[in-house]
């Protein structure tokens, strides 16, 4: 008589956790993607530097905003978050948003990959930078009093303010 192979301890624990979470979880609001969704959107089957940048940035969701900040202990502003994520992935980029904009090779939003930067303009000046995760999502440090979060380029505000998508990495990275 053959017996069914038992699930590994890990698979049983994972299954148990999923059952418990399914029983008590409520769906997150559509306007606020979760950190898990951000990390999932950033994941590449073969993790490129861009994928690593996106995953590192998504891992900072919840960190506080700080004007001029570029590290998790002190907080981030938008260009500081991009600078930090690229630096942690082993790739140096300019710190200032205008310099990031100038250094980036501009591409169409439809061609954006995880780790590319999305640039926003408020009135006549470059005002904000986000790190593209994929599936229309980007992670950013919004403004004073808020925390690093995920937003969608499809929201009317960001559609109106988007001025460019830029790639800082050479092809294949």
Image (spheres, rainbow, N blue to C red):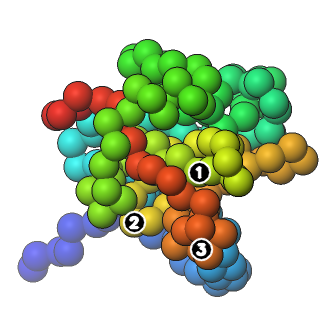
Marks 2 and 1 sit apart, C-alpha to C-alpha, by 18 Å
Residue extending furthest toward the left: 1
Percent coordinates x, y for residue 82 in the rendering: 55, 32
Instruction: Indicate the secondary structure of the residue bearing disc 1.
Output: strand
Percent coordinates x, y for residue 86 in the rendering: 46, 26
Percent coordinates x, y for residue 51 in the rendering: 35, 41
Residue shown at the point (77%, 24%) measured from the top left: 68
Q: How many numbered tags mark residues here?
A: 3
Is 6 or 60 nearer to us in this picture?
60
Residue shown at the point (59%, 68%) measured from the top left: 160
Query: Within the image, what quadrant is residue 46 found in?
Result: top left
Please say if 68 is above or below 18.
above
For the N terminus, give its image quadrant: bottom left
Q: In this view, does 166 lie to the left or right of 61?
A: left
Query: Within the image, what quadrant is residue 7 found in?
Result: bottom left
Marks 3 and 2 sit apart, C-alpha to C-alpha, by 13 Å
Q: Mark 2 points at which residue?
A: 135
Instruction: Indicate the secondary structure of the residue bearing disc 2.
Output: loop
Crowd class of label 2 (few under 14; some 14 to 19; many from 20; radius 10 Å): some
Is 14 or 47 nearer to us in this picture?
47
Crowd class of label 1 (few under 14; some 14 to 19; many from 20; radius 10 Å): many
Instruction: Indicate the secondary structure of the residue bearing disc 3.
Output: loop
Q: Does the image show residue 118?
A: yes
Residue extending furthest toward the front: 124
Q: Name the residue under label 3.
A: 155
Q: Name the residue under label 1.
A: 120
Residue shown at the point (59%, 31%) measured from the top left: 97
For the C terminus, give its image quadrant: top left
């Amino acid at each position: 008589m053959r017996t069914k192979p038992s699930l590994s301890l890990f698979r049983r624990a994972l299954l148990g956790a999923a059952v418990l979470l399914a029983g008590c979880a409520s769906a997150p609001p559509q306007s606020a993607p979760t950190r898990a969704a951000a990390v999932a959107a950033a994941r590449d089957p073969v993790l490129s530097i861009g994928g690593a940048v996106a995953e590192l940035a998504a891992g900072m969701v919840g960190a506080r905003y700080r004007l001029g900040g570029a590290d998790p202990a002190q907080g981030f502003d938008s260009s500081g978050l991009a600078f930090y994520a690229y630096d942690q992935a082993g790739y140096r980029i300019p710190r200032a948003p205008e310099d990031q904009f100038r250094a980036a090779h501009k591409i169409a939003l439809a061609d954006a990959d995880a780790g590319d930067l999305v640039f926003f303009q408020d009135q006549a000046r470059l005002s904000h930078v986000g790190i593209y995760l994929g599936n229309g999502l980007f992670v950013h440090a919004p403004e004073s009093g808020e925390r690093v979060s995920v937003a969608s380029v499809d929201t009317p505000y960001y559609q109106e303010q988007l001025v460019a998508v830029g790639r800082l990495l050479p092809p294949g990275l």
